[in-house]
Image: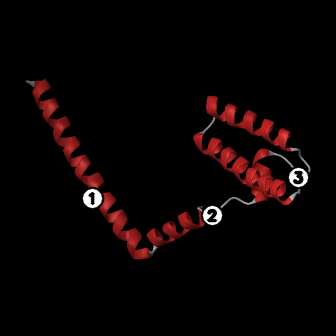
């Protein structure tokens, strides 16, 4: 008998808690739209979507303008693999984007040089 009462209390409490969480979420969304926080978040997301600069790419990979392409690839491989094993996906993607940025620069240099 006591187990049945306890189970009913747990189920009722869970339902009340779930409704309270949903109501709080709705209120938070309403407050965010009133204060303009939602619009600011969208604008920040758009700003972050810009292309990575060469300087940022070089900082991520830890290379300079004088670093050879082979060294850049080696640094990329080391950073990418270490983040694949026990790092974060975010850092791994930043390393990949940095290499892509520097690859584009290298490709432009190669096309500009006569063969």
The disc placed on residue 62 is: none
- Give the residue number, with chain letter if any, for mark 2: 50
Find the distance from the CA under tag 3 to the CA under tag 2.
Answer: 33 Å
Q: Left or right of 68: which side holds 51?
A: left
The disc placed on residue 115 is: 3
Asked whether the residues under the numbered discs 3 and 2 touch, taking CB atoms below 8 Å apart as contact, a structural biologist would say: no
- Give the residue number, with chain letter if any, for mark 1: 23
Tell which of 38 and 52 is nearer to you.
52
The mark that comes first in sequence, 1 or 2, is 1
Find the distance from the CA under tag 3 to the CA under tag 1.
Answer: 67 Å
Where does residue 96 sit, x and y in percent of width and height? 67, 45
Asked whether the residues under the numbered discs 1 and 2 touch, taking CB atoms below 8 Å apart as contact, a structural biologist would say: no
Where does residue 51 sit, x and y in percent of width and height? 66, 61
Q: Left or right of 7: which side holds 55?
A: right
Near mark 2 (Cα within 10 A), the count class, few <14, some 14-19 or many ≥20, is few
Instruction: Residue at 44% x, 68% y: name it.
Output: 38
Q: Secondary structure at mark 3?
A: loop
Q: Left or right of 15: which side holds 88?
A: right
Instruction: From this view, report whether residue 86 is shown above or below residue 43.
Output: above
Q: Residue furthest right?
A: 66
Q: Nearer the viewer, mark 3 or mark 2?
A: 3
Find the distance from the CA under tag 1 to the CA under tag 2.
Answer: 36 Å
Q: Nearer the viewer, mark 1 or mark 2?
A: 2
Q: Left or right of 5: which side holds 42?
A: right
Tell which of 77 and 112 is nearer to you.
112
In the rendered image, which quarter is residue 15 located in? top left
Tell which of 16 and 82 is nearer to you.
82
Q: Nearer the viewer, mark 3 or mark 1?
A: 3
């Amino acid at each position: 008998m006591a187990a049945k009462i306890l189970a009913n209390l747990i189920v009722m409490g869970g339902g009340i808690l779930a409704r309270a969480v949903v109501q709080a979420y709705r209120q938070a969304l309403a407050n965010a739209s009133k204060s303009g926080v939602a619009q600011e978040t969208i604008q920040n997301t758009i700003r972050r979507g810009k292309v990575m600069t060469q300087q940022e790419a070089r900082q991520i990979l830890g290379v300079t303008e004088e670093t050879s392409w082979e060294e850049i690839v080696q640094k990329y491989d080391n950073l990418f693999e270490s983040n694949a094993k026990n790092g974060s996906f975010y850092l791994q993607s930043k390393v990949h984007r940095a290499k892509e940025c520097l690859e584009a620069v290298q490709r432009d240099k190669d096309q500009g040089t006569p063969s």
